Amino acid sequence: MAKIQAVTITTPITGEVIPLNQVDDPVFSTGMMGLGFGVQPTSGQVLAPVSGTVTMIAATKHALGFTTPDNHLEVLVHLGIDTVALGGAPFTLNVEAGDTVQAGDVVATMDLDAIKASNKQTTVVLAVTNATDKLAHLDVTPGKATAGQTVAKGRLNAATFNAKRQGRLKPVDHYDELATAIVENVGGVENINSLIHCITRLRFYLKDESLANDDVIADLKGVIDVAKAGGQYQVVIGAAVTDVYDAVVKLIGPEYTNDAATAKVVADTNAAAQQPTTFGGKIKHGFSSLIGVITGSMIPVIGLLAASGILKGILALLTTYKLVSATASTYVIINAMSDSVFYFLPIFVGFTAAKKLGADPVIMGIVGGVLTYPSLVSIAASGKTISTFMGMSINASFFGLPVHLASYTYSIFPMIAGAWLASKLEPWLKRVIPTVLRMIFLPLFEVVIVSGVILLFLGPIITVLSTGLANLIVTVYNLSPAISGLLIGGFYQVLVIFGLHWAVIPIVANDIATTGHSYLNAIVSATMVAQGGAVLAIALKSKLANIQELAWPATISAFAGVTEPAMYGINLKYGRAFITASIGAAVGGFLTGLMHVNMWGFTGSLIGFTSFVNPKGMDFSFTGFWIASIATIVVSFTLTWLFGFKDEDAQTVKRAPKKRHLGAA
C-alpha cells in the first residue's frame, strides 16, 4: 500500500535544485501555484518530470502542463522567470497538447544564453498545482541533479489514496483544455493586457476586442456567455471561475495577472497608444476606465462584505430575541468578526486599488491604516467644531492649516483616489530618490504625501460629495419610494448584463457607511430574487437534461445573491424569460419601496434575510422583505412558466441575442 501511495517527481532539467521559497517569483515562492521546487539550469534540455498526458502548452512556449494517469496530479513546468515576454523565441518544443509522455522523455529545449541576454532569469520552476487536493506532503532534495533524477518524493493524502484504492478516483476536470480554447479565441496571449476575475467571470483587458471570437467562446462547454463592458472582455463561467482562472494563469503566465507589474506596464502602453481623439470618445473611455478601477478595487473584497453582512444580521437576530446581550463578550467577539471588514475597509480597498492602478499595495494599506487610526477616528467622532469653512466643520489643524477630519472607516472613494495619486507619485519618487536610499525614503515620502493629501484635501471633498450622493438617493427615494422601486427593480439587472452594476455597489456601500442602511440595496435584492424565480420555473418546466443541468444550480446561485448564471445561462439566452424576470423584479421593487423596506447589511436575495433585521430592534422591514420576495417569486415564476420559456426555444437558440453587446466599450 505504501508503494501506491508514494509519489516521485524527477527534475526536468540538469542544474541546482532549490527549495520553492528561494525562487525569485512570489507567485511560485509563496506556494500560490502549489508545492514543488526550482532548478537553476546548467543545460537547456527539458525532460518530462512525470509520466502522463501533456494537457497544457503556453502559447509563448514558456510553460508545459502534465497530468499523471494514476493519481491525476497536475504538474506545471515553467521555463524561466518572466520569459512570457520573450514570445517563445528561446524555446523549442517536441510535444503538443494531448501527447502521452514517459518520465525522462525530451519535451523541450531552452536557449539559456538567449534568455540571459534578454535580462530574464533562467530558473525552471516545477509546481504540482493541485497539491492541496492531492498530496499530504512533498519533500524536495536540494543540490546538484541531472535531468531525469528523482528529486522530490511525497505521499497522497488520505482522501486521494482511499479513492484510488477503491477505484473511485476520477480524472480532473478539463480546465486546461477550456483555458487553452479561451485564450486562443480572445486573440491569443499577445492580445491580452491583463486578467482578473470576480465571482462568476473572467475579466480580460484586451488590446483589440475585435480579435476575440465571441460566438466560439460562448459555445465552449464550461462557458455560460460573453459580455463586454467597462473596458473589459468578460467570459462568464459561473461557480468554477477560480478553477478556470488558475488554468488560464498557468497558460499565459502570472505576468498577466493583476498582481504583476508587467501587466500594468503593458496595459498603460497600449492604452496610451489607443487614446480616443473625439470628445465623446474621451468621455466613454474615461467612464470605462473608472468602472474598470472600481471593479478591480471592489471584486477582491465583495465576498467579505457579503459574508460580514450575513454575520451582522445574525447578530441582530440574536440580540433581538435576547439570546445574546449587547454587553456580553460573545456579542463583542461576533461584532468584531462582522464589523472588521467594514471598519478597516480603507486598508483593504487601498491594497486592492493600488494593485489595480500599479501603486505599491502595502504602502496604500498603511495609508488606509492612517485613515482608520483610533486617535483620528476619535477626533472625527467627537463632534467638536473649531470653525466652519464652506459649510464644513473644522475640527483639527495641521501646522496651522484648518482640517476637517471625517471618519474614514467604512469609506471607499478616498482610498481609490489616493491609490490613483500614489500611482502617479511613485514613479516620480523612484526617479528622484537614489537607489541606495529608496527602500526607506520612498515609502516615507509616499505615506506622508498621500495621507496628507487625503486628510487635507481629497478626503473632505469626497466626503461632502459622498454624503451628498447618499442624501440625493434618499431624496429621490422619498419623492416616491414605490415608483423608485418600480423603475430600479425593472432595470437594475440590465446593468448587470453590461457589468455596470459595479458602479452602483460602491454607492450602496457608501450609503450603508454614511447612514447605516440602504433602501437602494433592498430594491436591488428584489431583482436577484426575481431572476431566481424565473429560472426556477424553467428548471421545473423543462424536460431537457441540458437545461435542467444549468437551471437548478442557477436557481440556487440567484437565491444566494449571484444572478449571472441565471441570466447568462438561461434567462437572457431565451429572451422572454429575462423580460418576465424583470417584470417580477419591478413588482418586487415596487412593493419594497411601497412598504419602505430598509436594509442594514450588504448581502441580498433570500440568503441575505438577516440583512433586513434592524440592529436597533426588529421592525416591519423584515416582514416587508419576505412579503416582497414571495410576491416577486410568484410573479416571475408564473409569468415565466406561462410566457417566458418552452423547450422548443432551447432547440432553436444556441446563445443569447447579440444585442446585449451594445454596451461594449
Image (spheres, rainbow, N blue to C red):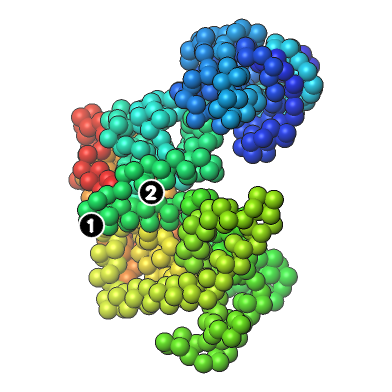
Q: Residue at x 64, y 59 (%)?
A: 443
Any part of residue 427 in sight: yes
In three-dimensional space, the C-alpha distance between marks 2 and 1, rounded to whole angstroms, equals 35 Å
Q: Is residue 310 visible?
A: no
**Horizontal and vertical percent position of residue 289:** 37, 53
Q: Earlier in the sequence, mark 2 or mark 1?
A: 1
The numbered disc on residue 201 is: none
- Residue 442: where, in percent of width, then height? 63, 57
Viewer-proximal residue, 141 or 42?
42
Q: What residue type is disc 1 on?
A: Phe
Residue drawn 51% across the image and 13% down it = 93
Q: Nearer the viewer, mark 2 or mark 1?
A: 1
Above or below residue 602? Residue 211 is above
Q: Secondary structure at mark 2?
A: loop
Q: Residues within 10 Å of mark 2 (few under 14, many from 20)?
A: many
Q: Are marks 2 and 1 in contact (CB under 8 Å)?
A: no
Number of callouts: 2
Image: 163 above or below 543 = above
Picture quadrant where residue 11 is located: top right
- Residue 514 is situated, as x and y percent measured from the top left of the image, at 47, 74
Q: Secondary structure at mark 1?
A: helix
Pinpoint residue 553: horizontal percent, then vertical percent: 43, 40
Residue flagged by tag 2: what amino acid is it?
Answer: Thr
> Is residue 18 left or right of 199 when viewed as pictured?
right
Which of 354/659 is in front? 354
Residue at 31%, 48% in the rendered image: 275
Q: Nearer the viewer, residue 351 or 433?
A: 433
- The residue labelled by disc 1 is 279
Relative to residue 234, is residue 9 depicted above or below? above
354 above or below 174? below
Residue 563 numbered mark, or none: 2
- Left or right: 111, with 294 as reference point: right
